[in-house]
Structures are given as C-alpha cells and as structure tokens.
Image (tube, rainbow, N blue to C red):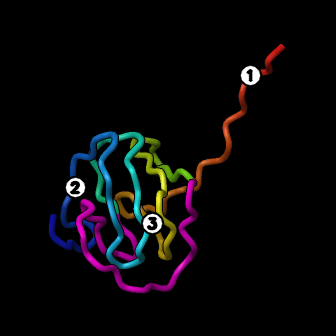
Amino acid sequence: MKRRVTGETTINLSTGQRLISTSGGAEFVVTKGGEADLTCNGISLEEKTDQSTSDADGPDIQLGKRYQGADGGVSLLCVKAGKGELACDGVVMQLQGARKLPSSD
C-alpha cells in the first residue's frame, strides 16, 4: 500500500493483518476486520514492511490496548506503542475497556 491522505481510500481489512503508522511509529494487528479508512495523524496506516518511521506528536497509543471504530466494525490491537491520533473513517477510535468475565462459582 502507498501513503494516502484521509478519505482517499477505503481498504478491506482482514483479521490478523499487521499495520503500521508511518507517522507515529505504532504497530497494530487487526482483531476485527471490515472496510475502513484507518489513519494516524491524518496519514493512512500501511501494511507492515521493513521501513523506518518518523517521530510524531499527539496522544499516546498504548501497547496491549484495543482500539475500536465508532461503529464497532473494525478493531485493532496495539503491538508497538507510538504517538498520534488513531482514526477510522475520519472518526477518532475509542480505547476499549476491559471486558467483565463471568464468575467462576
């Protein structure tokens, strides 16, 4: 994939696909796929390759946390922390909270 500006291209994401933010240095694994335009700092995420990343400003993207699109269609797991504002189809992605597990009674 090539670098794209927000809103130019919607891509089909599949579960297990690895993505990287070239503007913020964060890396992700798709945990729930679908069609979406994923961006960090306004620049589209790319499939992971051996490339260097640049430093960026913005909120922390937290290692080990899941991020979900506003419509719940796409979900990402952060496998390398970075900086920037993560967005799905132009809407900032939300940090998913912990799921309540059933009691072991």
Magenta segment includes 49: yes
Q: Relative to residue 103, is residue 44 drawn left or right? A: left
Residue nearest the viewer, comparing 8 with 84:
84
Give the Cα distance between marks 2 and 3.
15 Å
Q: How many circles with numbers are drawn on the protein?
A: 3
Q: Secondary structure at mark 3?
A: strand
Q: Which mark is residue 65?
A: none
The amino acid on which the numbered mark 3 sits, given as a three-letter code, is Leu
Residue 28 drawn above or below residue 40: above
Q: Which mark is residue 102?
A: 1
Q: Which residues are magenta?
A: 39-64
Direction top: furthest residue? 105
Give the Cα distance between marks 1 and 2.
37 Å
| Residue at left offset 50%, top offset 76% | 83
Task: Name the quadrant containing residue 99.
Answer: top right
Q: Secondary structure at mark 1?
A: loop
| Residue at left offset 56%, top offset 61% | 63
The answer to the question of whether label 1 and label 2 lie on touching residues, with beta carbons closer than 8 A, is no
Q: Which mark is residue 10?
A: 2
Q: Which residue is mark 3?
A: 86
- Majority secondary structure of magenta residues: loop
* Label whose residue precedes the other's in the sequence (2 or 3): 2
> Where residue 19 sits in the image (x, y, percent)?
32, 59
Residue 66 drawn above or below residue 104: below
Q: Relative to residue 14, is residue 26 drawn left or right? A: right
Residue nearest the viewer, comparing 21 with 12:
21
The amino acid on which the numbered mark 1 sits, given as a three-letter code, is Pro
- In which quadrant of the rendered image does the C terminus lie? top right
Task: Name the quadrant containing residue 24.
Answer: bottom left
The amino acid on which the numbered mark 2 sits, given as a three-letter code, is Thr
